[in-house]
């Protein structure tokens, strides 16, 4: 009887200890997960594609957005000791038209208490030049990556914002006033050219550290992404004079703009 | 009679053609072979081994209108074998709906030695090349994704993909690599010039040999033997239009008006000349280098002060250039539709 009680007490104690271990002790050989949610916005409103009234810009022009797609890659986490953990290479194409693309889970993250996340907007030069057989999933220019690849000047479009504006010049062929903002440019194959790869770091700040544990609860970062920041900020784009951005020096202004596009809203 | 064997398959076919009385010999597949006097290819064949089935699939794709939006245009529409796979007689190509492109269709030959593609060098790997004409609105105006759907729904293609790649899966990489296999087999290395540099002194006559000697002084530094390319970009002093060439790819002002050095192989079959096909014959090209060069900061330094070609050199060089026609290449039934 006594033995049994001792045994049970020991087991209970052991299981508490186990829980305690899981919570506090970090074993970097164990891997956990982290969720990301990219919530596309237009200013302080949820982004709605093709809304008739459009959204106001700082230049008091209106834009109706029909497409808002961008690549996220090269994700890193920084723990509270300053150590940087580079996650396994994954490439994500976030599309406003595809709700599923806006949320994904990062796996194989070493256990740790993390304080910030860093990622690349776009596709790095190594992946932009890799053999065609390796270009699968969202990097397949005829698959999930369709529409995000420049075939005439090999490379991916990092951020694509399209729509219409009453202030944009009339395209007589279609009788519309279109806007096309395609930002890409990874630095060039053999000769140097524009590099519109931008790295974003979002500190978790007052949200506190994110604990990643093997069997722990999976936290989710909720990141607001303001589409209007592509065409406003350091450079406020005038739709009447710059209705289009393709591969060219002007696109660098948009890349600089959208470094301010990502805001960590909350973590749960 | 065809002692210099580049592809035994070509030879056997040519022997068949040349000596019709002989019994048909079985066609032996040799795959890609580097001609003995050519350098090592740029293309990494270990990533895409040329096989008979892959080549056959690539050839079918090359000549298939399914690659265009309405089925009207195939790769072979603007890259015609008898014109060394150019659109002979067209300054710029006619694509879908009779729309005009902006540049002269380049020959498809010796692709395995090219480090970049298109006149402006916008594509750096052969496997990525075919996406551009398929998706160009004035060429085939289709999406590769849609091409793949059409191929998957086709009664023949799944089996051909299985023969070439082991399973019936039809994807971007397999489709593009099959096209690369076909293009990489388009090796032109059997001209009279080739016979000459391989030791047959009788292959070029005295004037052609004088032309080669002049060529080596005046032209060789860009049109490097034996491929007559340098994989680089130069402004050669043409009257300038709004086509900025390689600048569009690099955005470097020093690249404005520069275009890729074209090969001179099969030159006689590939008129008109220059990136926009502005010169309809070889004399106009040679006249340009003799007296038509427009100065500009980006003009290639080899064409500035002191560059000259005499009338005699012009005639000799022209005679030499006409020895660069590869009749075996442009008639090889292996490459025909």
Image: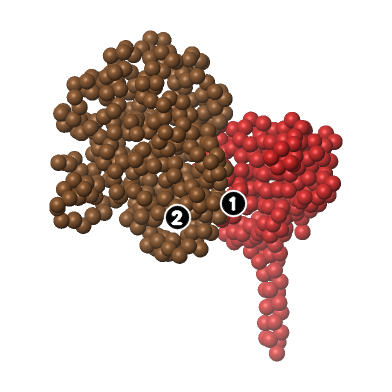
Image position of B311 (left or right of A220)? left
- Which element carries disc 2, helix, strand or loop? helix
**Picture coordinates of residue A147, whole percent (x, y):** 61, 48
Q: What number is the disc on residue B148?
A: none
Q: What number is the disc on residue B174?
A: 2
- Residues behind callouts 1 and 2 on a single chain: no
Residue B132 visible in image: no
> Observer-nearest residue: A35 or B72?
B72
* Circle 2 chain: B
**Picture coordinates of residue B111, whole percent (x, y):** 38, 40
Residue B324 visible in image: yes
Residue name at image x 82 percent, y 37 percent:
A61
Calculate the distance from the C-alpha at mark 1 to the C-alpha at mark 2: 17 Å
Q: Which residue is mark 1?
A: A145
Tags 1 and 2 touching, CB below 8 Å: no
Residue name at image x 31 percent, y 13 percent:
B311
Residue name at image x 27 percent, y 25 percent:
B320
Q: Is residue B5 above or below residue B307?
A: below
Q: Residue furthest bottom?
A: A1
- As drawn, the chain in red is A
**Picture coordinates of residue A229, whole percent (x, y):** 76, 40
- As drawn, the chain in brown is B
Q: Is residue B266 above or below residue A93?
A: above
* Circle 1 chain: A
Image position of B176 (left or right of A72)? left
Image position of B86 (left or right of B252)? left
Q: Residues within 10 Å of mark 1 (few under 14, many from 20)?
A: many
> Observer-nearest residue: A83 or A228?
A228
Task: Specify the quadrant that holds the N terminus of chain B.
Answer: top left
């Amino acid at each position: 009887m006594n033995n049994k009680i001792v045994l049970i007490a020991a087991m209970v104690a052991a299981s508490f200890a186990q829980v305690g271990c899981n919570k506090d002790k970090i074993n970097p050989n164990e891997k956990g997960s982290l969720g990301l949610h990219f919530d596309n916005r237009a200013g302080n409103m949820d982004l709605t594609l093709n809304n008739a009234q459009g959204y106001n810009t700082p230049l008091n022009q209106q834009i109706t957005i029909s497409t808002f797609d961008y690549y996220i890659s090269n994700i890193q986490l920084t723990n509270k000791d300053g150590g940087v953990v580079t996650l396994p290479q994954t490439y994500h194409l976030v599309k406003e038209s595809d709700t599923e693309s806006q949320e994904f889970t990062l796996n194989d993250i070493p256990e740790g208490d993390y304080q910030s996340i860093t990622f690349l907007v776009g596709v790095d030069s190594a992946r932009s030049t890799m053999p065609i057989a390796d270009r699968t999933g969202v990097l397949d220019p005829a698959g999930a990556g369709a529409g995000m690849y420049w075939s005439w000047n090999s490379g991916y479009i990092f951020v694509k914002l399209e729509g219409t504006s009453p202030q944009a010049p009339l395209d007589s062929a279609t009788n519309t006033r279109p806007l096309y903002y395609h930002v890409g440019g990874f630095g060039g194959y053999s000769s140097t050219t524009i590099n519109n790869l931008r790295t974003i770091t979002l500190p978790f700040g007052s949200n506190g550290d994110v604990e990643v544990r093997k069997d722990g609860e999976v936290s989710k970062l909720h990141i607001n992404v303001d589409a209007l920041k592509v065409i406003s900020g350091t450079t406020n784009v005038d739709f009447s004079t710059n209705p289009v951005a393709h591969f060219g020096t002007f696109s660098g202004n948009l890349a600089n703009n959208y470094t301010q596009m990502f805001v960590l809203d909350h973590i749960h | 009679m065809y002692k210099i064997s580049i592809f035994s398959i070509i030879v056997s076919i040519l022997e068949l053609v040349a000596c019709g009385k002989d019994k048909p010999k079985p066609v032996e597949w040799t795959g890609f072979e580097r001609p003995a006097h050519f350098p090592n290819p740029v293309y990494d064949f270990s990533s895409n081994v040329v096989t008979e089935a892959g080549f056959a699939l690539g050839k079918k794709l090359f000549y298939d209108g399914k690659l265009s939006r309405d089925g009207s245009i195939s790769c072979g529409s603007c890259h015609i074998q008898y014109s060394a796979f150019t659109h002979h007689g067209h300054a710029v190509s006619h694509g879908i709906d009779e729309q005009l492109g902006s540049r002269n269709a380049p020959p498809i030959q010796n692709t395995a030695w090219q480090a970049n593609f298109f006149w402006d060098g916008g594509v750096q790997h052969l496997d990525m090349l075919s996406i551009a004409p398929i998706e160009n609105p004035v060429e085939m105006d289709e999406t590769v994704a849609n091409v793949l759907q059409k191929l998957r729904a086709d009664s023949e293609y799944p089996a051909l993909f299985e023969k070439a790649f082991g399973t019936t899966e039809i994807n971007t990489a397999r489709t593009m690599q099959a096209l690369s296999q076909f293009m990489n087999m388009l090796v032109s290395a059997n001209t009279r010039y080739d016979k000459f540099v391989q030791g047959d002194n009788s292959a070029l006559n005295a004037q052609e040999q004088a032309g080669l000697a002049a060529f080596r002084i005046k032209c060789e530094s860009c049109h490097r033997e034996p491929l007559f390319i340098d994989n680089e970009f130069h402004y050669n002093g043409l009257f300038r239009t709004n086509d900025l060439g390689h600048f569009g790819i690099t955005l470097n002002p020093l690249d404005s008006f520069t275009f890729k050095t074209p090969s001179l192989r099969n030159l006689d079959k590939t008129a008109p000349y220059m990136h926009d096909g502005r010169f309809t014959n070889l004399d106009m090209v040679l006249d340009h280098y003799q007296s038509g060069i427009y100065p500009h900061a980006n003009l290639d330094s080899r064409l500035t002060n002191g560059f000259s070609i005499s009338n005699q050199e012009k005639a000799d060089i022209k005679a030499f250039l006409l020895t660069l026609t590869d009749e075996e290449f442009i008639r090889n039934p292996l490459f025909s539709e």
